[in-house]
Image: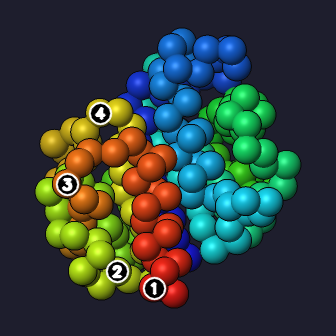
Amino acid sequence: MRRFLVVGHRAVTSPEFSLDDLAGAAGRMDILLSAANAALLVAHDIRRDAEADLLLLGPPDPPRLVRILGHRVRSYQPDLRSNAALIRKALEHGSRVEHEVAPGILASKTTFPEALDRLGPAFVYLRQGGKDIRTTAVPADATFVLSDNQDLAPEEERAVLARDALVLGLGPHAVHTDQAIVLVQNELDRRGV
């Protein structure tokens, strides 16, 4: 299983956000949704061996974890607006107990360290300057940790590294979160991992 945990530092945690302003008023929800698409979609299909985990840390009620399971999700589309509606539905669930709000969509109030504990056991922290993914063995059952358009906060980075995360880079230039996920997926597909 390939899991991609994407931290959305400003992504709103109220279901009241506008579907027409995902980049602005929704706190860069567009980045999280593009990352989920990169994790889950291939041409004309969904990756059944992948999971997109979105940790929303913006106002008014953080933290919120929305997990999208490739092997169970239904009604998942390539367009961000439709998928944003699924996130809105997930945000209506405000319990710390994880609940399936729609087929393959799970929601809970979960902190970053709790999300890591739930998603382990092996972690790959994607960071510019890490070991080259093309020359490094990657666990077959791993959670890849990424951030939105902000770096992980120091305490978040410490939490990942405390779990013996493998720190990998994807090349000499920084890329967008969704592009990083596509590069990882293609590299692991090429290897047959």
Task: Residue at 60%, 67% (x, y): give it.
Answer: 50
> Quadrant of residue 123 in the image?
bottom left
- Residue type of the residue flagged with mark 2: Val
Give the quarter of the figure containing the N terminus: bottom right
Q: Earlier in the sequence, mark 3 or mark 1?
A: 3
Rounded to the nearest angstrom, the CA distance separating label 3 from label 1 is 21 Å
Residue ID for mark 4: 150
Q: Earlier in the sequence, mark 4 or mark 1?
A: 4
Rounded to the nearest angstrom, the CA distance separating label 2 from label 1 is 10 Å
- Characterize the local packing of mark 1: few (<14), some (14-19) or many (20 or more) Cα atoms within 10 angstroms: few
Q: Earlier in the sequence, mark 4 or mark 3?
A: 4
- Characterize the local packing of mark 3: few (<14), some (14-19) or many (20 or more) Cα atoms within 10 angstroms: few
Residue 60 appears in view: no
Task: Residue at 52%, 20% (x, y): give it.
Answer: 23
- Residue type of the residue flagged with mark 4: Gln
Q: Earlier in the sequence, mark 2 or mark 1?
A: 2
Q: Earlier in the sequence, mark 2 or mark 3?
A: 2
Q: Which type of secondary structure does the marked residue at label 4 adopt?
A: loop
Query: Could you tell me residue 121's position as x and y percent?
Result: 39, 76
Rounded to the nearest angstrom, the CA distance separating label 4 from label 1 is 30 Å
Query: Could you tell me residue 172's position as x and y percent?
Result: 19, 54
Residue that sits furthest to the right in the current view: 75
Pointers 3 and 1 in contact (CB under 8 A)?
Answer: no
Query: Could you tell me residue 155's position as x and y percent?
Result: 19, 44
Rounded to the nearest angstrom, the CA distance separating label 4 from label 3 is 18 Å
* Circle on res. 191: 1
* Circle on res. 172: 3
- Characterize the local packing of mark 4: few (<14), some (14-19) or many (20 or more) Cα atoms within 10 angstroms: few
Does 3 sit left or right of 97 as displayed? left
Pointers 2 and 1 in contact (CB under 8 A)?
Answer: yes
> Quadrant of residue 108 in the image?
top right
Query: Could you tell me residue 43's position as x and y percent?
Result: 73, 59
